[in-house]
Amino acid sequence: MLKRLSFLTAIFIISFFSGCGSVKYITEEPQRSLSIGEEAQLQVLAAGDWRNSGVMLRKGEKYKVTASGKWQIGGTCNPTGPDGIGVYAPFCWDIGGQLVPGFTQAALIAKIGNNGIPFGVGESFEMVAERDDFIFFRSNDNMLGDNKGFLNVSIRKISGEGLSLPTGETIVKHTSIIAERSRIAVLGLKPTTKGAADEGYGDMVSEMLITGLIKTGRYEVLERSQIKQILSERQFSEVDVVVGESAVTAGRMLRVKYLVIGSVAKIQNLTEVDVRFIDTETGKALLAENASCQSMGDLRNAINQLINKITTGYPGKL
């Protein structure tokens, strides 16, 4: 038995470190700027390092990136699309090998310029460029050598008037995207079963949501202690917040753009989580997502996948 464990350990170590190398792109995309409505397309390899799209983003102009196809991150992981949802399998774990926290290792990510800060893209992402520079793409995986497949990526200019890039000219500057972080508050999730209430799942899952949303870098998230203090001072109960006037009132008190509300149920080993993003100006739900898992050990991973669905599936709403 000990020998078998040693053998399996050796196999794991070999497979773990064998995927460190990446494929280098032999050809580069032609350098150009886009006109309004024009698209540029390219392929991004799962095993490839950062790929320069050749598209020069222009300051103040709005762009939309979409991606399609399937790739596989590691030999033991499930094939996925650009959002990376469903990648983890019995022998494929989240081991912290992501460049962008809050997204799985199989998610498509991007950066603006050689020294840009990576950000998640997934299937669809809209942005406004803060400076002129090229946009790069790759998978969110730190170990690329054992990856397979590719994605088709499209970049379309939505608005703005840019200048054409002269032939042969290369501009490489540090750049970023205008990311006005939305201020949000995650209220305590309502336990809908005795098991969830007895084990404190409402507050526990809320904390997991807060941590995951902060990691995306897209939101300014109020701490739970702040929420409780502000609402208690005004004798307002967060458990009474639902879609409609109560959400508008709570939003004004907390001075947030969005509220995250929802419920959690626990029946034996099964945990079900439902969340909704509420616009505090209208009181209407902008989106709703759910997640489920079969064990406590998988709960955080399920929450991270739920957040991944929100950040990649609704980029124009939040």
Image (spheres, rainbow, N blue to C red):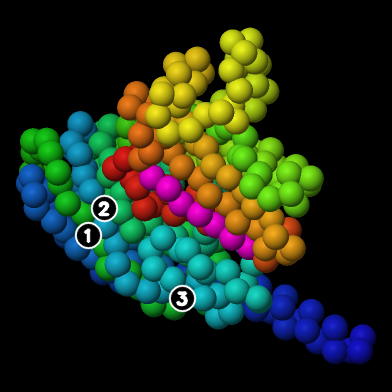
The answer to whether residue 91 is seen in the rendering is yes
117 and 194: which is toward the camera: 194
Three-letter amino acid code of the residue under disc 2:
Val
Circles 2, 1 touching at the beta carbon (< 8 Å): yes
Instruction: Please provide the residue range marked out in magenta.
Output: 287-293
186 and 283: which is toward the camera: 283
Residue depicted at 79% across the width and 79% down the height = 9
Residue at numbered disc 1? 154
Q: Position of residue 5 (x, y in %)?
A: 85, 83
Local crowd size for mark 3, using a 10 Å CA cut-off: few (<14), some (14–19), many (≥20): many
Q: Is residue 293 above or below residue 162?
A: below
Residue depicted at 43% across the width and 34% down the height = 243
Residue at numbered disc 3? 79
Tell me: 32 left or right of 246.
left
N-term mark: 2 or 1: 2
The quarter of the picture where the N terminus appears is bottom right
